[in-house]
Image: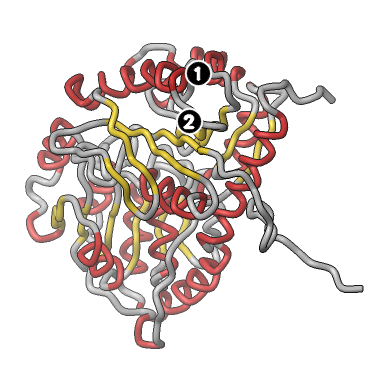
Amino acid sequence: MTGSTTTPGRPAPGSQIRRYTVAMSIFDSVGNPHYNGGGPIVVHEVAKRLARDRDVVVYTASYRGSRSGSRDGVRYVHLPVGWAGPRGGQILFQLLLPLVAAVGRHAVWVETLTPPVSASLLPALSRRPVVALAQMLSGADMARRYRVPFHLVERRALRLYRHFILLNDADRILISRYARPATCEVIPNGVHRPALTDDDFGGGGHLLYLGRIDVRQKGLDLLLAAVRQLPPGMPLVVAGSGVAAEEDKLRRLTRGLGAEVVLAGRVSGAEKERLISSCAAMVVPSRYETFSLSALEAMAYGKPVVYFDLPQLRWIGDDCAIPVPAFDVAALARGMHRVANDATLRRTLGRRGHARSLEHDWEVVGDRYGAVIETALRHGRRRPATQ
């Protein structure tokens, strides 16, 4: 007697299932000029895999020139919140989601939690199950920044959710404390892995920061202070975009650094790939991070990572990267100087990181999201049984 196996989240080969609609929401999008974060990449990679046997619609924020339409089998709808600006638009976006859900014909909703409070009223008002995708729990950071108790509101609002997808164990522990009972599934992000040759390890002519320009949250002030304290011996390229105020702040911080720092602005596609493949190492100086897709992308290209040793980033490991004590500018400067001036070290760390990136295949990630969605549909909006 022969058995058959199926992949969690996918229907069995040849089986007949009723297609249903999955709604996903995320404020940021690939073309949004104000952010350029990794979240929209994750949502799209997952959505296009879910769309193989489901109908998928992604709700995102409008911006100047944005157009709703389809891409890779996924329908994108831009909600009209761009007029409120990047900050006000986030709040308006959260308020609109329950209204959109009320008239939508979706079976389940995957909500990417949005600052300043990483929660919304969607699960309380939706008639369908809601899965919270916590790419960032921003309440504590926003409370420190604006001196408003966003974190207290966030803690209470998280209790509305019954299903979570998280990127790391540190956030899972936090969510389990505030949102019991709830199902919490840790699903790290995925990555595309280029074909590499032996010559691709150990090279590179610049250090690279790649991500959203948010000086405080992303630790760009600490990064530039480290460059001033101990120039690494090769240029630091800062690539990414943000709101105008943050980009102005970054330019002020780079004054006097000359050729030590290159501001590349927003990059994507072939230009982004070129910057990663030609760098000596990726630097992740964030004060707060949930995963760091840029670190994983660097590892896929065989590049070492220098990063602050945050609990959320310990998946990277110290055998393929250089972790330094959190927010220690002198240690960050030494780490960058070390990796910039030791090609043998870069080669060793790069090979190990490239091997580790094998664990982050997008097909596996998509299947795991599908399994969470199926679980949410079976449970509906019922509370899980208490232990």
Q: Is residue 219 left or right of residue 172?
A: left
Q: Determine if residue 258 is in view.
A: yes
> Neighbour class for label 2 at 10 Å: few (<14), some, many (≥20)?
many
Kindly give the residue lying farthest to the right in the view shown.
Answer: 1
Identified by mark 1, the residue type is Glu
Q: In which quarter of the image is residue 176?
A: top right
- Residue at 71% x, 34% y: name it: 378
In whole angstroms, how far apart are the C-alphas of marks 2 and 1? 9 Å
The percent coordinates of residue 89 (x first, y second) are: 26, 22
Determine contact: label 2, label 1, CB under 8 Å.
yes
> Neighbour class for label 1 at 10 Å: few (<14), some, many (≥20)?
many
Q: Is mark 1 on a helix, strand or loop?
A: helix
- Residue at 38% x, 12% y: name it: 148
The percent coordinates of residue 269 (x first, y second) are: 25, 62
The percent coordinates of residue 219 (x first, y second) are: 32, 41
Q: Determine if residue 143 is in view.
A: no
Q: Is mark 2 on a helix, strand or loop?
A: loop
Identified by mark 2, the residue type is Leu
- Rendered-image quadrant of the N terminus: bottom right
User: Where is mark 2, residue-wise?
Assistant: 137
Q: Is residue 178 left or right of residue 51?
A: right
